[in-house]
Amino acid sequence: MTIRVNLDVMMAKRKVSLGDLAEKVGITQANLSILKTEKAKAVRFSTLEAICNELDCQPGDILEFVKDEK
């Protein structure tokens, strides 16, 4: 199973840059980039909440469960 992160899609839809979103959410650009590129092992609910608040979206707009193909 895989959790796909569609943060880049939502950022593009809202026309928000990585730097602007990082500043508004209160995390570093490096940490937001790690999440955006699917290299993060976890995400705090408070961070997810702040991202959703800034992008006016739901967690399911950003995170997607994808089953492994057998």
Image: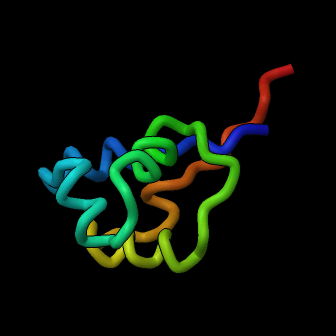
Estimate the x, y position of residue 34 in percent, counting from the top left.
49, 42
Identify which residue is drawn at 60% across, 62% down. Answer: 43
Q: Nearer the viewer, residue 12 or 32?
A: 32
Furthest toward the left, the residue is 15
Dividing the picture into quadrants, the one containing residue 70 is top right
Locate the N terminus and report the quarter of the image it occupies. top right
Q: Give the colour scheme shown.
A: rainbow
- Given residues 2 and 29, the one toward you in this image is 29
How many dots with numbers?
Answer: 0
Q: Residue furthest top?
A: 70
Image point 51% across, 62% down: which residue?
60
Residue at figure coordinates x 50%, y 47% from the top left: 35
Q: Is residue 50 left or right of residue 1?
A: left
Residue 67 screen position, x and y as percent: 75, 37
Indicate the position of residue 28 as horizontal and vertical percent values: 37, 57
Whether residue 22 sits left or right of residue 44 in the image: it is: left
Residue found 18% across the figure and 49% down from its top:
17
14 relative to 56, above or below: above
The percent position of residue 10, horizontal first and vertical second, equals 30, 52
Left or right relative to 23: residue 35: right
Residue closer to the observer: 66 or 32: 32
